[in-house]
Image (spheres, rainbow, N blue to C red):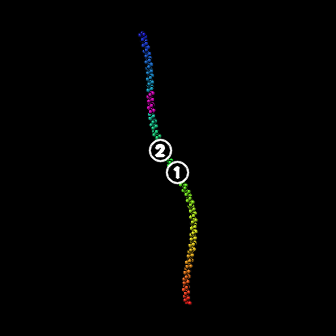
Amino acid sequence: YTLRDVLEKSEQDRERLVAQSAAQQKELLDLRNQNAAQCTRIQELLESNSKMAASIMQEQSKTSTIRTEVDTIRKDRNNLTQELQDKKVEMEALITKMMALEEELEMLHSQQDQIQEENYHIRADYHKQLEHNRQLVKSYNRISSKLTDAEERNTKTETQRHVLEMDKGDLKEKNVKLQKTL
């Protein structure tokens, strides 16, 4: 190789290296531009991620609040279910009691009907007895009147008998006197 050949080769290598360097610098610039775009994109994604994380935190807070509300609603529902069950048992007891009271009322109505019927018969018997008593009073009054009349006649008769006995005694004395005088 001659110096010229070496120089030409060296010049060719240099041109090739300059072209390679220019290509690599262009590629480096493209990579830097891509890197800057990617950094911008990463920054946008980080901001979006931060916003999304804040939104997720809000949603988690809402979800936690909703869970608390759901738990409260479940407890209230369970309490209401228990209260409803208690009321159902109480209502069934009241229905049973009401049915017993209705049976008792029906029995009392039946007894009332019997009592009214007995009362009707008692009134009828009372009126019969009252009429009988009136008849007895009338009979008593007639008998009392007859008895009073009989007692008065008896008293008159007794008085007359007494008078007759006195007259008889007087007659006997007169008779005895007459017999003595005769």
**Mark 1 and mark 2 residues within 8 Å of each other at the beta carbon:** no
Q: Which mark is residue 153?
A: none
Alpha carbon distance from label 1 to label 2: 25 Å
Residue at 44%, 32% (x, y): give it.
50
Total numbered labels placed on residues in the image: 2
Q: At which x and y percent is residue 83?
A: 48, 46
Please state the extent of the stretch shown in magenta in the rendering: 40-53
Give the vertical position of 22 relative to 41 (above or below): above
As shown in the figure, which amino acid type bears the numbered disc 1? Answer: Thr
The answer to which image quadrant residue 11 occupies is: top left
Give the vertical position of 155 relative to 85 (above or below): below
Please name the predominant secondary structure of the magenta segment in the image.
Answer: helix
Q: Which residue is mark 1?
A: 96
Residue at 42%, 15% (x, y): give it.
14
- Eye-nearest disc, 1 or 2: 1
Q: At which x and y percent is residue 162?
A: 55, 81
Give the vertical position of 99 relative to 25 (above or below): below
Callout 2: 10 Å neighbours few (<14), some, many (20+)?
A: few
Q: Which mark is residue 79?
A: 2
In this view of the protein, which residue sits in the foreground, 20 or 136?
Answer: 136
User: Is residue 59 left or right of 175 when viewed as pictured?
Assistant: left
Q: Residue furthest top?
A: 2
